[in-house]
Image (tube, grey):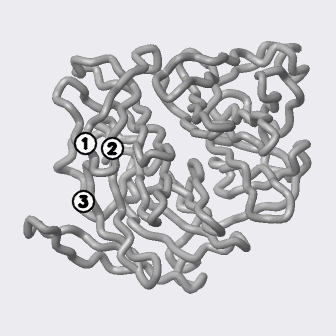
Amino acid sequence: MMNHVSRRNFIAAGLAAPAILRGQDKSGTKLPVIGSGEYTYEVHHDWGELPSKIKYGKTHGVCRDSQGHTYVHHTVHKTSQSPDAMVVFDEKGKFVKSWGAEYREGAHGLHIRKEGSTEFLYLCDIHRHVVEKTTLNGEVVFSIGYPDQSEAYSKSKIPYTPTNLAVAPNGDLYVADGYGSSYVNQYNSKGEYIRTFGGLGAEAGQLNNPHGIWMDTRGPEPIVIVADRRNYRLQTFTLTGKHIAFIPGLRYPSHFHMRGELLLVPELEARVSILNGKNQIVAHFGQGPDNFREVRLLERDAFIPGQFVAPHSACFDDDGNIFVVEWVEVGRVTKLRKLA
């Protein structure tokens, strides 16, 4: 794997790699501590009391609702007794419920949004090639399939596999075709098609594996920010799909979450980063092995405590703690408890 962000550049940016320290929980078990300064975290790998009937496949998506429940979207392991692809935990990591057998092979993008007094989930299924809006219990509100109305797709039936989506303040949906043809497709709040932008390439406005997408509301006007993964960068767009800027310095960025001015970016090449309100990288932590693609196929005893293998999605909670889920064959959910 080509490393597009060298260790030299990493240190030159003023972000020397922090040492992994050791912490101690109430039971006396030693826990890794990663990061530095105000971005220091105690690492709790394999967070959440997963019932024995469920075995994780690839843990692809994570989000939290207003009640403090954590939702994990995973492709179910072939040895799992239960086919449920959505697992829900309470604030302390106790299992609450599971559902979503229909997503067991394609569970990928996961987004939550409060609309009025009700919260809804938006899910991307990379096996059935659909985007679905559901209730918190999995009842489907609507489903969006192949973008036939887009001229880019209708001419030659190019590949389509949605990986993540973002929701604008007015309810418009922006669906990233990350594993298909590298476009972004925009729909209104009812799932009706509006426009397509992006497309494969490396020039301004072009994308290569737009794996993650987010509505950036930190500025005076909302903009779309895309994890332009194979181009090793983020790229920002207006709400009508016009290129604004590039944000370099990321190692295979996968998705996003925001808390205040901070932008959380899980990077598949084995680390997590945080950007400030000016899109400057202020923290990298949990850097794992360069051969993450091989390590991700192994069992948990091959994973080094305090290091990530392949972060795929992440989110903050209200206290600034971070939940990270990883693209590993046996799944992994890690809670980073904020110390500073």
- The structure residue drawn at horizontal position 33% and vertical position 31%, both measured from the top left corner, is 57
- The number of callouts visible is 3
In this rendering, the answer to whether 33 lies above or below 89 is: below
In this rendering, the answer to whether 63 lies above or below 179 is: below
The reply to whether residue 186 is in sight is yes
In this rendering, the answer to whether 319 lies above or below 180 is: below
Q: Mark 3 or mark 2, which is nearer the start of the sequence?
A: 2
* Type of amino acid under label 1: Lys
Residues marked 1 and 2 touching at CB (< 8 Å): yes
Residue 281, position as x, y percentages in the image: 61, 73
Callout 1: few (<14), some (14-19), or many (20+) C-alpha neighbours within 10 Å?
A: some
Residue 304 is labelled as: 3
Residue 26, position as x, y percentages in the image: 13, 68
Residue 51 is labelled as: none
Q: Horizontal placement of 239 versus 118: left or right? A: right
Where's the C terminus, which quadrant? bottom left
Nearest the viewer among 305 and 316 is 316
The reply to whether residue 183 is in sight is no
Mark 3 secondary-structure assignment:
loop
In this rendering, the answer to whether 339 lies above or below 116 is: below
Q: Which residue is mark 2?
A: 90
Q: Nearer the viewer, mark 3 or mark 1?
A: 1
* Type of amino acid under label 3: Ile
Q: Horizontal placement of 111 versus 180: left or right? A: left
Residue 94 is labelled as: 1
Residues marked 2 and 3 touching at CB (< 8 Å): no
Gap between marks 2 and 3 measured at Cα: 27 Å
- The structure residue drawn at horizontal position 69% and vertical position 65%, both measured from the top left corner, is 248
